[in-house]
Image (cartoon, grey):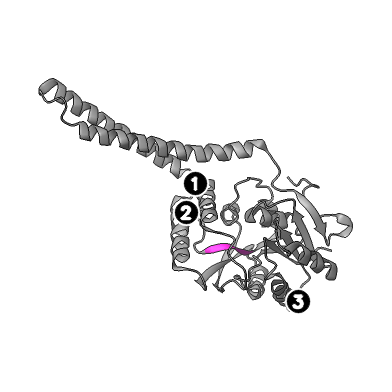
Amino acid sequence: MAPVLSVVVPCYNEEEVLSETHRRLSGTLGDMGVSWEIVYVNDGSRDGTLDILRKLARDDDRVKMISFSRNFGHQIAVSAGMDHASGDAVVLIDADLQDPPEVIAEMLALWRQGYQVVYGQRRTREGETAFKLATARTFYRVLNHLSDTPIPLDTGDFRLMDRCVVEAMRHMPERDRFLRGMVSWVGYRQRALPYDRAKRFAGESKYPLRKMISFALDGILSFSTKPLRVATFMGFSASAMALLGILYALVLRLFTNIWVSGWTLMFIALLFMGGVQLLCLGIMGEYIGRIYRESKGRPLYFVAERAGFPDGAVSRAPKPDPVR
């Protein structure tokens, strides 16, 4: 019989916090009075994370573990956990304890009221720098302005989803995944749950500036074609400026004896047009690159090891390795 609640926890180099995460998570779930399972996904960790997960799976048959053949990234790890989860409702939560496991009880109560998605909305974010707070705030507002699908502000992947939403998500196999946007896109009855985000219990952030920029690009380019429209607008603007430059040069040539005058304007216009062309090519290249990755049709991930599943079976997973 499938459990009522599945909790998916992606893990990447989390040996310092994992034991405490499991203690708090299993304690919270045990007090909720429902059948449950925890699906840990080892995303190619290089520390002792895998050994800890093996032990947790041996000690408790409600703990499931899958381990990737290499690091595939946070969003892919979460997707794999959803593929392997069997509960009527599925909760996504990171292992770093910034999202308090105790909030899951409130999410479950709202789910019982009929909400099919309950997403955590960050009220405060303890322990994060002013730069991180400012860039996150700006990103969500820029994304919402550009996106064709409204995405709730100040949210992460911490959320509860009904089984029907999980199944809908599993029909979306794109490679450049932005899960919080995908959940908004599928619709259903959704509800925000404000909460206070804590600082990391231990370890360091797995999202340095480079990954944050890449993640932001995935969010914008996966849910909007407006950057292409901006490129088109800039192309028209550059063409208009070039036409003005041509008219200016013709007037000088036909009606005056000053032919060299105006070279500064022409030089600036030339640089501007070159910059616009390169920018537009870069925007188009980002979209074409995504089309190229999708066209290859590679699996999202490969599983090297599983533990805690009966007879090696994977409940409700689409097919055996490689998945997708």
- In the rendered view of the protein, which quadrant contains the N terminus? bottom right
- In percent of width and height, residue 150 lies at 50, 55
Q: Is residue 163 above or below residue 217?
A: below
Indicate the secondary structure of the residue bearing disc 2.
helix
- Dot 3 corresponds to which residue? 30
Front-most of 301 and 17?
Answer: 17
Q: Residues within 10 Å of mark 3 (few under 14, many from 20)?
A: few
Q: Which residues are magenta?
A: 155-159
Q: Is residue 171 left or right of residue 197?
A: right
- Asked if the residue under mark 1 is in contact with the one under mark 2, i.e. CB atoms within 8 Å, the reply is yes
Find residue 77 and report its horizontal and vertical position in percent: 68, 55
Residue of label 1:
224
Label at residue 143:
2
Residue at the location (30% across, 33% down)?
270
Q: Residue at x 66, y 36 (%)?
A: 296
Amino acid marked by disc 3: Gly
In the displayed structure image, the side of residue 243 where residue 49 appears, left or right: right
Identify the residue at the far top of this view. Answer: 254
